[in-house]
Image: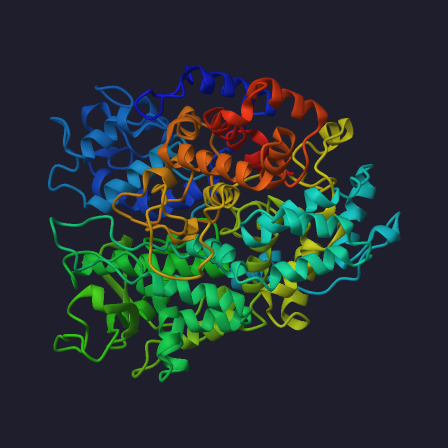
Amino acid sequence: MSLVPNPVDRSRGQSLTTAVALAIVLGMAPHARASADEAEGLALFEAKIRPVLIEQCYSCHSAEENVAKGGLRLDSRAAMLQGGDGGPAVEPGDPELSLLIEAIRYDSYVQMPPSRKLPPEVIAAFEQWVTMGAPDPRSDDGSTPEPPTTGIDWDAARSSWTYQPPKRSEPPEVSDPSWVRSPIDAFILARLDDSGLVPNPEADRRTLARRLSIDLLGLPPDPLEVEAFVADPSPNAVEAFVDRLLASPHFGERWARVWLDLARYAEDQAHIVGDDTSLTYPNAYLYRDWLIKALNDDIPYDTFIRRQLAADLIEPADSDELAALGFIGLGPKYYRRNSPEVMAEEWEDRVDVVSRGLLGLTVACARCHDHKYDPISTEDYYALAGVFASTVMFNQPLTDECELDDDGEAKAPENAMHIIKDADPKDLNVFIRGNVEQKGPVARRHFLSVLSDGEPILLGDESSSGRLDLAEAIVDPSNPLTSRVFVNRVWGQLFGQSIVGTPSNFGILGEQPTHPELLDDLAARFVTEGGWSLKSLIRELATSSTYRQSSAITNAHRTIDPENTLYARAARKRLVVESWRDSVLAASGSLDRTVGGTSIDPSDPDVGRRTLYSRISRLELHPMLARFDFPDPNAHSDGRARTTTPLQKLFVLNSPFVTHHADRLADRLASEAGDDPDARIDLAYRLLFARPPSDAETQLALSFLGSDSCNDPERWAVYAQALLASNEFLLID
């Protein structure tokens, strides 16, 4: 594909084409797409796909019913791929070529199920499942490889690593004790010793400055800060640099975005009828602002969780803390309020975001049957769902002047803070196979049985939903998962991969930990010594010898540990879209560092607010964010995909946003470095890469810019854009 710019967007002509070649020399970013998380896809299948197939399709398309209308069976992966008279039912990875999707959309003469069209959210789940490759654990005869669940042996389940409380371990003896700055390093080095690998040397100060600044703040370092760090002779220079970053008001912005992904933050709904905006959240940003402040204040993580589940029950007089309830209160909300089918979908969302987000367990897979893999019963699912069935989403008036309805809610969403509150407490019946019309026994609200010592911990009573009880059970130090899951997430943010590679699934389908003793030791100390402090945890990780290593790859790495699961080197990480856009703004001198506030359009060239403040829509995710792997806000997300597509590069070459800021960067170079082209090139490299250029890079630039370059601002703008398109700008070493 040609990368010649669109002349409608910019008339830079041959200069930009030449700049593309320059950017390639500098290293444009070919980056392999990470494989889809199979565990996530299987969890989606169990929670959303299998129940619908059983309920709606098997009566006409299964071996069990001894019927295959149209020659089609849907009770095994092989049968779906083989298809029926019309061909394969599913084309993994491509919903548009999948006959099953066409049929459930009612887009052809074949319409399934024939009785009535499935709800839009169910169709969307099938589309997502096919996009993920249609992962399916069923065997060719329609059964599951694992034996069917006939009862859960709770004692056996609790004996597994996942459900054992994290415990301290003595750091192991290692070959080079001088390399050990914290217990982390001892655990890492011991594994390296066993594997015959040695850790990489420490990265140079400039590399560390950029890595630390982007990892902790999501922003590039200021060139003056870098020079001061490089010149600091103190043996504690790295610790001091980290402490300055932790004290920055921008720390909360960077880490709030991680949490917003987990919380499936959005400001509207996936389905909006006409101009009806009654289910939207115009003031969702108040929850985002609360997160930023809470993280900057380093409130203990257990308090952080309590407030997001039950702030109104803890500090009812503190209206500022009510915004924390956006964790649940900003979730998907559907039309046909109070319809049993609709409310069941909402309850599942609440159970899912709490269980995967805070506990690393896929509890929602047990909505229709006992979990196929993990010790979670259907009764457990409905016991938790009952907590959220005992609440209502509530538009809390922002001022006393708001017009209210009979329930005390603000009538207009734009005058409201979107939270939850207790309603009529209730225990739910178990819905047989998830069918709201087939009620089984009542499930008394309780915490997960496998995480309870003996009888399940009861939640709530006839006067309360149980939200506060649920929060207390989650953050109880004896709970083996809460600290472990959180520490694992933080590790993944800093090191590029988590110790448990499936951060939201610590169950059977999740990956096994690469360093279980290390994770346990960190999780135990996080609670007992660190006081649940995120900043203390990050300080220990970011100042460790493990984190400080260079990212150079040796032949030994390629041979023994190509995936770097042993951490013999630092991982090269690609900037997420927020850090990439913010880095462009910072380099061009356009970054507005105001903390907090309402949402923005990130593609507007004249808007300098950080990308964190982008408006997030479930109905139509902003194209710029979607193009650069921003997650779907309709559901909890435990990490970012990493794709490289032609559209990403064409955006960098042609978008008004990038060309505008390339112009601004060129203006900044001229303003701050004057008419000396060498000085301008030097400043460009320090702004973008936190280092001076090499002689070869300077000569390459001069040869492109020409002898009279200082009188040609257009050529400088093209050069600036080429640097913004480079591989080095996109990656953190």
Question: x and y percent of residue 46 in the render?
Answer: 37, 46
Question: x and y percent of residue 272 in the render?
Answer: 17, 50
- Nearest the viewer among 187 and 66 is 187
- Asked if residue 400 lies left or right of residue 361, the reply is left
- Asked if residue 687 lies left or right of residue 18, the reply is right
Q: Is residue 96 above or below residue 470?
A: above
Q: Is residue 620 above or below residue 386?
A: above
Question: x and y percent of residue 35 in the render?
Answer: 50, 33
Q: Is residue 67 visible?
A: no
**Quarter of the view holding residue 335:** bottom left
Q: Is residue 111 above or below residue 517?
A: above
Residue at (69% x, 22% y) in the render: 696
Residue at (31% x, 59% y) in the render: 331
Question: x and y percent of residue 184 in the render?
Answer: 74, 55
Number of disc labels: 0
Q: Is residue 487 visible?
A: yes
